[in-house]
Amino acid sequence: MTGLVRKRCSDAAAVAPAPSSAGNGSALEHYRERLKLDRHALDFAAESQPELFLAVAEQHVLALSRLDAAKDELTRLDARLARDVRKRIEAEGGKTTEGRIADEVLTQQEHIDHATTMSAAKIEADNWSALRTAYDHRLRMIRELVSMYSAGYYTATGAAGARTEGRNAGAAAGREALAAARQARGV
């Protein structure tokens, strides 16, 4: 990978930790921007990949932890609301069935608010999971681009070499056709 152009002006920003703002999209956007590869800075991309992948993986784990906490909180809230609904129905002298209690719990504003919070945590965890997968694909793309660079794909001589080979093959085919035509005429 020698000879690659390094873009040092963006080095600090590329590996710098994301803004510490759990829950909002700025950290997610920060790492999404770092997904992009520059074929002229493959050495830097290869060097920074492990740090970036680790940072994204850690954010994914934190998002999963927040999702688990939201699920636990919703479960505890539902249990408390079910207990309160059961007490209220029994105090009114009504029949307490599990279906009725569950229906009333699901319609309570507290449950709806916590379920919305849990849904947001799930979306965040899913976004971090997708980003983590994208960084895994980024690693494979870095390898592919390095192979292409090593094979001379991005050099002017590499592209000209392919054109020259095609031209030489065409010329050889033409020479063979002329030779066959001469031989057919008996010359």
Image (tube, rainbow, N blue to C red):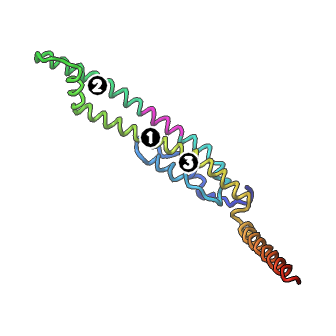
Residue drawn 56% across the image and 46% down it: 135
Q: Residue furthest right?
A: 187
User: Which label was assigned to residue 16?
Assistant: 3
Say which mark, if any, is on residue 78: 2
Q: For the residues labelled 1 and 3, say whether their Cβ atoms are less than 8 Å apart.
A: no
Q: Quadrant of residue 2?
A: bottom right
Disc 2 to disc 3, C-alpha distance? 41 Å
Which badge, 1 or 3, is on the more N-terminal residue?
A: 3
* Amino acid at dot 1: Asp
Q: Is residue 62 magenta?
A: yes
Viewer-closest of 182 and 140 = 182
Numbered disc 3: secondary structure: loop
User: Start and end of the magenta stretch?
Assistant: 57-66
Does the segment drawn in magenta span residue 163? no
CA neighbours of label 2 inside 10 A, class few (<14), some (14 to 19), many (20+): some
Q: Amino acid at mark 3?
A: Ala
Q: Quadrant of the C terminus?
A: bottom right
For residue 187, side relative to residue 9 (left or right)? right
Dominant secondary structure of the residues highlighted in magenta in the image: helix
- In this picture, residue 78 sits left or right of residue 30: left
